[in-house]
Image (spheres, rainbow, N blue to C red):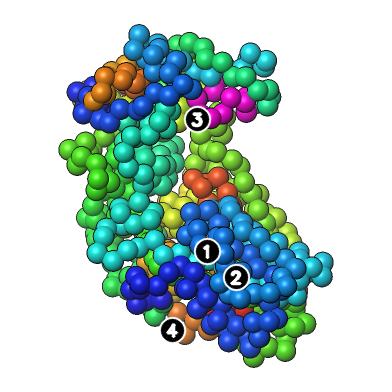
Amino acid sequence: MRDDQLSARPSPVPDPESEPFFEAAGRSELLLRHCPSCGAWAWPVPRLATCQNCLEHGLEWAGASGAGVVHAVTRVHYVPADDDPSWAPFVLGVVELDEGVRTQIVGLLAREGGDVRVGDPVRAVFSPTRDDVYVPWFEVLGPGPAGRER
Amino acid sequence: MTRRRYDVSAVDLAAEAVKLALEDCQLAKSKIDGLLVNGNMMSSEVRNNLQDALGLEDLTFLNTMSAGGATAGTMVQYASFAIEAGLASVVALVFADAPLRRETSIANSRYGVPVGPAPGLEGLGRTYGDRGQAAIRYALAASRHMHLFGTTSEQLGAIAVAQRQWASLSPLAQKREPITIEDHQSSRMIAEPFRLLDCCLTSNGAVAVIMTSADTAKDGPRPPVFVRGVGQGHPGEPVRPGRDHGIRTGAVAAGRQALRQAEIGLEDVDVLQIYDSFTYTVLVTLEDYGFCPKGEGGPFVADGRLAVGGSLPCNTGGGQLSGYYAWGFTPLSEGIIQARGAAGERQVAQCDHVMVSGSGGFLNYHSTVILSPLEGPGRSVAHHA
């Protein structure tokens, strides 16, 4: 995925729960969920304010580094009939962030001159979608050190 | 099963399957006192209303169960517990669904993924191009396996080719024309590494299995099939931190539990019915059951041992890649057919123990059932239509 591709994609519609996440993306900051009770980090899950680690209610938003490595990756060639076929192919992956959290499936930029591979270092970047809502995605910084595994 | 049927509702298909199953085991409908219904994405009228649609009265055991493609095995386990405990004597297990509509693509079927903007964090996936498609999630696991172990697309293709060979012998299968590795390699890419021929079919259809005690089944018109062991293993969401994402599945725990209960080892398994949402699901399950070491599934399947005439016959009805898509009821039904020696041209001669798997979610859930024509440790009996 490139940011010029992202500008053609449908926008998420921020709601009260997700407003801080998208608002932070607009100023190039990645927010994760953080448990004030046990300190665990989590990728935000809709309608879940309870920590999956200690089961305390009251996850808070907290700024994350945005740095991580590719944990799993696929290039998608199929676009459902009601989406724009020009999107394909695009790269999706799971990123393991330095906070020890894995993302849900997110967009990744194909590395210039090569494939995206497991272990490649990435950083979060932020681009506007069709309706100017900023979303995080991940840019591949280069090939990972051989044998680096997460 | 092979006819394309669009104008029948899932609940009508369910009723037809139950009728055929009762005829098959020569039991009156009034004997049914337990009903387990496969839940999850199934048509809501099946989930909510099957007892009334079937006109079943005075049940003493009823539930809808949801562990995705692993549900069938968990239903077999719960029904056997209920029968052993005297809670019910004849239990019907039912899967029915009718996602396909006439003159629309699968993308627009009821399995089609949601369209349009979604509120908040759910909308983020739509922006990325992830609308919850199973192919994307399983492709992430399979590509990781390739990265770690050097597994190839041709090796995955060997699974598809073997299953199509079996399907060519099955009158129940939707896809019966033989395919080659070259056909697999030239089929269009869906989500790397999956090509079209790595992906399962979609079907309108229903399966009903009737379970009762061994004593009752012995009076029936057909050779009984004994449930010798059942296991479950549900590792949870594979992207959770620290999990070996898509590489080690619930098959490890479920397989061990089922074999232990049946008091047999892997070397005693004659026929496999392995849940095949995608070719990769078969490969990772074979590794996790211990048929080969972790990471060696690619070379293991590439030599044709799963195919017709191979040493480890697998998905002998074509599975869900070539046979029909009835979630965990595809491997379960073919397992029963083989164990009772009724598979016709595709019957495996030596068939004392059939190992049946179910896998659900995105490798979140797993169940294993060991079926046998031989009575032994284990429980009650399954009939099927």
Lower sequence index among marks 1 and 2: 1
Q: Which mark is residue B119?
A: none
User: How far apart are the alpha carbons under marks 2 and 4?
Assistant: 38 Å
On the same chain, marks 1 and 2? The answer is yes
Q: Is residue A137 left or right of residue B314?
A: left
Q: Is residue A112 left or right of residue B173?
A: left
B137 lies above or below B65:
above
Q: For the point 75% across and 83% down, which residue is it?
A: B216
Highlighted magenta segment, given as a residue range: A41-52
CA neighbours of label 2 inside 10 A, class few (<14), some (14 to 19), many (20+) = few
Taking the magenta stretch, the answer to whether it contains residue A47 is yes
Lower sequence index among marks 4 and 1: 1
Question: Depth check: A104 or B146 in front?
Answer: A104
Residue B69's spot in the image, x, y percent?
52, 56
Amino acid on which disc 1 is placed: Val
CA neighbours of label 4 inside 10 A, class few (<14), some (14 to 19), many (20+) = few
Q: Which residue is mark 2?
A: B52
Amino acid on which disc 3 is placed: Pro
User: How far apart are the alpha carbons under marks 4 and 3?
Assistant: 51 Å
Question: Depth check: B133 or B339 in front?
Answer: B133
Amino acid on which disc 2 is placed: Asp
User: How far apart are the alpha carbons under marks 2 and 3?
Assistant: 36 Å
Q: Which residue is mark 1?
A: B46
Q: Which element is circle 4 on?
A: helix
Q: For the point 75% across and 75% down, which residue is it?
A: B89
Q: Which element is circle 3 on?
A: loop
Q: Which residue is mark 4?
A: B345
Taking the magenta stretch, the answer to whether it contains residue A40 is no
Q: For the point 58% across and 58% down, which residue is it?
A: B71
